[in-house]
Image (cartoon, helix red, strand yellow):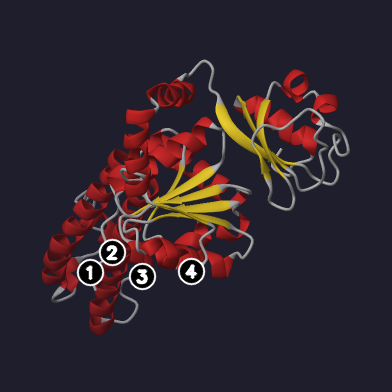
Amino acid sequence: MEEASPSPNNPIEVYLASRRRVIVALVVLVSVLGLGAFGYWYLAWLQMPGLWSFADCVYFTAITITTVGFEETLELDLVPGSRTWTLALLVFGISANLYVVSSITSFFVESDFGNVRRYRRLRRRMDEILDHYIVCGVGSTGIHVVGELRAMGEKLVCIDQDEAHLHELEREGVLTLHGDATDDEILTKAGLSRARGIVATMDDDKTNMFVVVTARQSNPNLRIVTKAVSPSAVAKLKRAGADAVVSPASIGGMRLASEMLRPQVVRFLDEMLRDKEANLRIEEAQVGPSGDLVGKSLREAGLRERCGVLVIAVRSPEGKADYVPSGDLVLEPGTWLIGIGGPEDIRRLRRAVGDRRG
């Protein structure tokens, strides 16, 4: 089977391929040197055992194949066939020398040692990463998922079969894996067992379903969100184990209708998401059993003053939603708070209420 060529976007693959060529070239050169020395020694042994020592044969072979030719330490006239052997050795020896020189030159020219070190650091980060998100497919949909996760300061690993999609992310320091997200080995390398969640954004429902099933079997506690290309696939993907399924066609239709009916609301949300200085998001935090604010009311908690977050909705542990919560609402373990704030504000809120993500 033909060996796959190294990826031009992966310096480690280029470096390893160049190093393999150098090793093979050196093995060839040593083999020619050993075979040439043995040939001289054997021809001399046939004529007169002990006539030439093996060390002298190695030295003569070395100066022959390198075309240095200081002085003939072996008297070739004494051994029939030795000159013919020398001619053959010159042909193979010079070829081996050229192969070694070209391989070493290629090694230093093609190997970007700075990028190799950077890639090794990224791979070490990949082995150590914990509580991260995995994005499978960084095409037209996935790249926006990556952008939002990065904007919120989350750790992530991106998987895609198209190296062009990964190249720019690699340059920006994002952990990436080139391969098929349906491959168990690729998901394992991405740290699936240590991940907090996985997003499948491929353009094929069957592929997304395979990722969902594999992820759910490998990590039952993982939060799985997937894209549904066909509206009919939504129910199937949920049955397969997805916690949430997003249909871009449905979301797009709702957005078009919202632009028509409530343009100021849409404009407000867009500006909130795009404002680099404000960097506001509508986020969530769950009250944990060890939170400092358990048992306190929203008014007593003073989340606006304490954390800089405006709470706009609350969902009780039983699942009942209160979209306009009063200040008398008591915070219980398991309560979800929905609020508006910046990334650091949200982190302060989560720490304050005992959310494990804080």
Which residue appears farthest toward the right when viewing the image? 295
The residue that mark 2 highlights is 28
| Quadrant occupied by the C terminus | top right
Give the mark nearest the N terminus, 1 or 4.
1
Disc 4 residue crowd, few under 14, some 14–19, many 20+, Cα 10 Å: some
Q: Nearer the viewer, mark 2 or mark 1?
A: 1
Which residue appears farthest toward the front when viewing the image? 261
Q: Nearer the viewer, mark 3 or mark 2?
A: 2
Give the mark nearest the N terminus, 4 or 2.
2
Q: Amino acid at mark 1?
A: Glu
**How many discs appear?**
4
For the residues bearing labels 1 and 4, Cβ distance under 8 angstroms? no
The residue that mark 3 highlights is 54
For the residues bearing labels 3 and 1, Cβ distance under 8 angstroms? no
Q: Which structural element holds mark 3?
A: helix
Q: Which structural element holds mark 4?
A: helix
Please tell me the numbered disc located at residue 240. 4
Q: Which structural element holds mark 2?
A: helix
**Residue 348, x across and y down, in percent:** 73, 29
Distance of label 3 from label 4 (alpha carbons): 71 Å
Disc 1 residue crowd, few under 14, some 14–19, many 20+, Cα 10 Å: few
- In this view, the residue in front, 130 or 136, is 136
For the residues bearing labels 3 and 4, Cβ distance under 8 angstroms? no
Please tell me the numbered disc located at residue 343. none
Write the residue at 20% across / 60% down.
93
Q: Nearer the viewer, mark 1 or mark 4?
A: 4
Q: Amino acid at mark 3?
A: Phe
